[in-house]
Amino acid sequence: MKVLFSAVHPAQILDTKNVYLKLKEQSHQVRYAARDREVMIALLDSFNADYVVISKKGSFLLEAFIMLFGLLKQIIRFRPDFIIAVGGSLAPFAGWLTRRKILHWSDSENSLMMNFLSHPWTTKSLTSKSYRMGYRFSGFLKNKRILHNSLFQLAYCGPGYFQPEQKFKQRLGIDEGTPLYFMRLGNFDSYHDVNVPRPDKGTLITLCNYLSRKGRLEISFEGPPLRQLEKFKMTLPPSTMQQYIYHADLVFSQGACTASESAILGTPCVFQSHLKWGYIEDEIQAGILFRSEPEEIIEACEQHLDRKTDPDYRKRVAEFLNDKEDLVELTLHILKDPRFWSITETIDPTLPPFNLDLRFNRLPDK
């Protein structure tokens, strides 16, 4: 079997990493087609992935054209049996043009442009049961969905996939008893970030100074950092980001992916964004993720500063994760069972004819 993975964002590499590794262990031919971004290349190198870079930095339209050409070139050369794409991607369209089977992981209902570019062309969509149909272009998924009760972040932060590093704080040069605070700050240059409210620079700087006085603060910047915050830039490579989140006492994030990672790793997170996705709303309703308005981020962080040791919070996290499913195992089933591709309606793998029990606590030891 040959499988081509398309990645245009670092989170998409993390989502599919364990599918890639399991297929490689089983002697299948696997490859990433990746965007030209330093963080993405570092992530791929961290697990010795086979990859090709298919884009160059430039304007949105220019880079999109180069990516589409690069994808078509790779599909023709590699001749994959399946293409796996996550979120916004041109890979479904490239796969449709070359008559390849595309498994598209969908979890961002309101990313309208990328949904327009991907939903009509995908063969099957791996879609959470929390995904809210009714958004523009979601109608293209009506009979393509393979449902799951999970989150993409569990494909690398779930049981058996994420391993806490016991001496992580020692690597940072701090004592175990020193509080650690982590931030993920966006650059708001994506099309779906248009008109997204954000804190003013003064408020953000005040929050960073406040947390740095309480303990160690490190920040992952999506774009160029503010001059006043450069001293807080994370010191370890991007591949350690989930270790930062796990060991932190509090996370502040402007990105949904980091916010969700925090929630399932049991670290309280103040999420500053008005954008709403089904899986994020589920975590907020479960009381394991906390949304804040831009002007209230300092008060919100103060409120949840000691939340991690709260028994009620820890119980909420455990209850939320109790019946979640393993997306890595589900993806492997989909690739290997032709029935998934022949059924022309929404599929629930836990029901006939599949009857799969994909819950983490029901899977055999790996």
Image: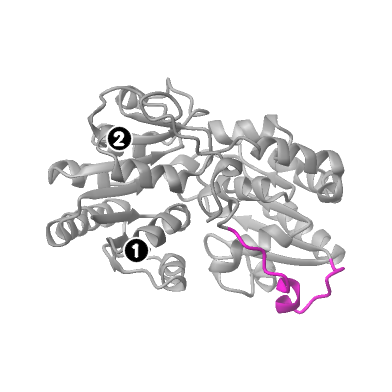
Rendered location of residue 29, percent (x, y): 26, 62
Q: Is residue 172 magenta?
A: yes
Would you say 223 lies left or right of 260 here?
Answer: left
Furthest residue toward front: 364
Rendered location of residue 233, percent (x, y): 64, 70
From the image, state whether disc 1 or disc 2 is nearer to you: 1
Q: Are dots 1 and 2 in contact, CB under 8 Å?
A: no
Are there few (<14), some (14-19), or many (20+) residues within 10 Å of tag 1? some
Rendered location of residue 252, percent (x, y): 70, 52
- Judge whether 150 appears above or below 83 on screen: above
Residue 87 visible in the picture? no
Which residue has dot 2 on it?
124
Residue segment shown in magenta:
162-178
Would you say 248 lies left or right of 12 here?
Answer: right
Q: Give residue 122's quadrant in the image.
A: top left
**Helix or strand or loop: what does disc 1 sit on?**
helix
Along the viewing direction, whichever of 56 and 97 lies nearer the viewer: 97
Are there few (<14), some (14-19), or many (20+) residues within 10 Å of tag 2? many
Residue 135 visible in the picture? yes
**Helix or strand or loop: what does disc 2 sit on?**
strand
Would you say 117 lies left or right of 174 here?
Answer: left
Which residue has dot 1 on it?
24
Q: CA distance from mark 1 to mark 2?
A: 22 Å
If the image is split into quadrants, where does the N terminus sit? bottom left
Along the viewing direction, whichever of 120 and 354 lies nearer the viewer: 354
